[in-house]
Image (cartoon, rainbow, N blue to C red):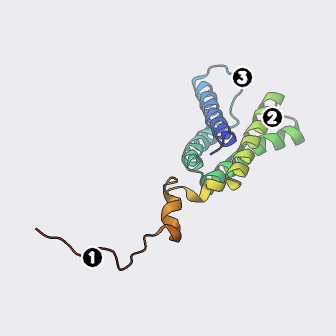
Amino acid sequence: MGIISYLITMFVAMFWVFRVAVAYTYSMGINFITVPMDLTVEIIILFITLFSFIFIIKRNIFGAIIYFATYSWYFGTCLYNGITLGNVNAFDMFIAFVAIVIAILNLIDILLNKNRTKVGSDYNSGWFYKDKKFDRNFDERVDKNQYKF
């Protein structure tokens, strides 16, 4: 993974921690800079995000699609209501916009990642075992005796 991939993944994690703080402060009745649109849906999305974050770290496209779909659905509703109805404050719309941008960047990053298909194999020795020209060729000079004492 490149530095941009690490940064996007860190932004995903930091935004998840921010949303955990928003849900916690709202459930405890503490004033915070923003409130969730729906607390039960917010908690469900936090667990879905935690599940998809595991796949995002492994550079799996399945996790990026789940992350993008859930955040587009949840925060896209907030943006839509703010733009059309005007009943959402500007800061909540900004947070929804940032959430959707992070999800889009994460999806694009995993789609364009060259190492996505190589997850699970050893990067240092994969070139050796996949290449036939490095296979050992036996000829008639090879000692085929099995010495037993």
Considering every residue shown, the one lying at the far bottom of the view is: 140
**Front position in the image: 140 or 128:** 140
Answer with mark 1 or mark 3, whichever residue precedes in sequence: 3
Q: In the displayed structure, does residue 53 sit left or right of residue 71?
A: left
CB within 8 Å, label 3 to label 2: no
Element at label 1 = loop
Foreground pick, 68 / 122:
122
Residue under numbered circle 2: 93
Helix, strand or loop status at disc 2: helix
Q: Which mark is residue 33?
A: 3
Identify the residue shown where x is 46% and y is 69%. 135
Cα distance, mark 1 to mark 3? 77 Å
Q: Which residue is mark 1?
A: 144
- Looking at the rendering, which quadrant does residue 1 occupy? top right
What's under tag 2, amino acid-wise? Met
- Disc on the earlier residue, 2 or 1: 2
Looking at the image, which residue is at 72% across and 41% down? 102
- The foreground one among 106 and 77 is 106
Q: Give how far across and how far down residue 121 sits, in percent.
A: 49, 57
Q: Position of residue 92 (x, y in %)?
A: 77, 31
Nearer to us: label 2 or label 1: 1
